[in-house]
Image (cartoon, rainbow, N blue to C red):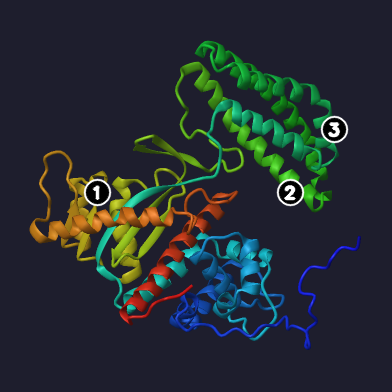
């Protein structure tokens, strides 16, 4: 039986065109955003970032206008790089945003990713500052009223326990060592009994340690740590032997070598921390919580059901009108309430040239020294929520207004952590890209709010 062809069996007089003509709605969200932004200034900002990071300007000039549009498009609706490429190639409003309606060219996923990586967290922060200044120029944001808070950006890593970290180390070293040169390959082959014994102990712990006492669990963890220490000693010798020939590695061999080195260095820090925990029962300072991203740290939040989050600390400032600026902390001490309460105003002054007239922060940042420092910086209405029975520095209508503005920053933080913007648990494998994802989420929030507020002022109903 002959299979019937799909589609219409009615012949067409003229072949159907595969280049459709689409009329864009002038009130489409992306069309309005394209018309409102100053693309010349954006290109100047990006070009200055490129010059500061590239060692040479050799090669073909990049299509900055299209790549900036791709980054903005991805910020306004969180998606993967592959989906971004597909949308720009086939979605007419996205092509209009990227200024590609008169060409067949489309940036591929790798080009977009490389461009975002080149911009980095600091570059996207400058783009975000540009968006906030646009809102101020349009009268949609008021820099005279500022509120601030800190939050945690959770990383997409499993819960850090000792057995899980050591099991990850064994698996990753075994996989990377096979392609990182002949010496490491020989090491993996010779250490196969150690890998097998450690994996058996890990499996035994995961299957049978649930109902055992703490002493027995610790003994099982110590047994795995002993085997990992033997693997570490063998790996150290293999790395010393392979050091002279690492220049011969190419392509994936170089990647595997770099990964093996990172794992070895991280486990060198982690093993003493595990021994310290087994001996004292306390978590060591600066505990490693991820082998793949060892710069991550624990952020104690004290929330109901989630007392600790594993990732990075961020400082969020909100101007009156609802537009946000973000600051990433490289360590847990960089963005603390006691420090960020003053640093937020200092950053505000660097961006706008003067301190806000009114400023609000929660009780985590309250201290007499902070109040005095803010007054010396030029803040007239200091609305820090006091601790204990201390009195507010502001009263009456001003106090009510600052309390209202302070409450709204929580909703903004919740918005950027939603699946629409991707601030929370981003699919990033380095601290640098986590910073990029965080700034991109805030940028998307600000741009969407900018186009909404402009449409609202002009009494336009947005589509798309």
Residue placed farthest to the right in the image? Answer: 1
Q: Distance between the residues labelled 2 and 1?
A: 46 Å
**Residue 239 higher or lower than 373, as above or below:** above
Label placed on residue 347: none
Q: Residue at x 38, y 62 (%)?
A: 325
The one of 398 and 327 positioned closer to us in this rendering: 398
Q: Distance between the residues labelled 2 and 3?
A: 18 Å
In the rendered structure, are the residues bearing label 3 and label 1 in contact, judged by CB atoms less than 8 Å apart?
no
Give the residue pinned by disc 2. 255
Q: Which residue is drawn at 78% across and 33% down?
A: 238
Label placed on residue 362: 1
Tell me if residue 361 can be seen: yes
Residue placed farthest to the front in the image? Answer: 1
Label placed on residue 186: 3
Q: Is 200 displayed left or right of 120 in the figure?
A: right
Which quadrant does the N terminus fall into?
bottom right
Labels 2 and 3: the sequence-earlier one: 3
Q: Is 138 displayed left or right of 193 in the figure?
A: left
Labels 3 and 1: the sequence-earlier one: 3
């Amino acid at each position: 039986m002959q299979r019937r062809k799909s589609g219409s069996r009615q012949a067409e007089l003229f072949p159907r065109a595969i280049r459709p003509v689409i009329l864009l709605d002038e009130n489409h969200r992306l069309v309005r955003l394209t018309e409102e932004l100053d693309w010349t200034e954006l290109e100047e900002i990006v070009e200055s970032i490129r010059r500061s990071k590239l060692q040479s300007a050799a090669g073909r000039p990049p299509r900055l206008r299209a790549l900036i549009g791709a980054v903005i498009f991805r910020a306004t609706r969180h998606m993967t790089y592959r989906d971004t490429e597909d949308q720009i190639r086939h979605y007419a409003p996205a092509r209009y945003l990227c200024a590609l309606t008169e060409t067949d060219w489309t940036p591929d996923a790798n080009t977009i990713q490389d461009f975002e990586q080149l911009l980095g967290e600091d570059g996207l922060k400058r783009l975000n500052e540009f968006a906030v200044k646009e809102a101020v120029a349009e009268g949609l944001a008021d820099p005279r009223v500022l509120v601030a808070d800190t939050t945690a950006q959770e990383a997409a890593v499993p819960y850090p326990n000792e057995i899980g970290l050591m099991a990850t180390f064994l698996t990753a070293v075994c996989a990377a060592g096979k392609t990182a040169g002949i010496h490491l390959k020989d090491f993996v082959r010779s250490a196969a009994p150690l890998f097998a014994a450690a994996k058996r102990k890990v499996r035994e712990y995961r299957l049978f340690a649930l109902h055992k006492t703490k002493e027995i669990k610790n003994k099982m963890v110590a047994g795995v740590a002993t085997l990992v220490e033997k693997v570490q000693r063998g790996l150290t010798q293999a790395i010393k032997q392979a050091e002279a020939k690492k220049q011969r590695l190419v392509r994936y061999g170089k990647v595997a070598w770099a990964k093996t080195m990172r794992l070895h260095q991280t486990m060198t820090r982690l093993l003493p921390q595990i021994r310290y925990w087994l001996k004292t029962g306390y978590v060591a300072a600066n505990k490693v919580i991820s082998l793949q991203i060892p710069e991550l740290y624990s952020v104690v939040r004290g929330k109901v059901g989630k007392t600790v989050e594993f990732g990075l600390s961020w400082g969020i400032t909100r101007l009156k009108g609802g537009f946000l600026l973000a600051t990433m902390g490289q360590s847990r001490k960089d963005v603390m309430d006691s420090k960020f309460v003053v640093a937020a105003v200092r950053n505000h002054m660097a961006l706008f040239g003067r301190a806000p007239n009114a400023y609000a922060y929660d009780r985590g940042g309250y201290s007499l020294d902070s109040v005095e420092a803010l007054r010396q910086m030029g803040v007239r209405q200091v609305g820090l929520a006091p601790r204990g029975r201390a009195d507010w520095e502001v009263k009456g209508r001003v106090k009510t207004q600052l309390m209202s503005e302070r409450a709204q920053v929580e909703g903004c933080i919740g918005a950027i952590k939603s699946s629409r913007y991707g601030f929370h648990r981003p699919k990033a494998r380095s601290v640098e890209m986590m910073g990029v994802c965080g700034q991109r989420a805030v940028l998307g929030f600000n741009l969407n709010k900018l186009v909404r507020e402009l449409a609202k002022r002009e009494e336009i109903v947005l589509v798309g």
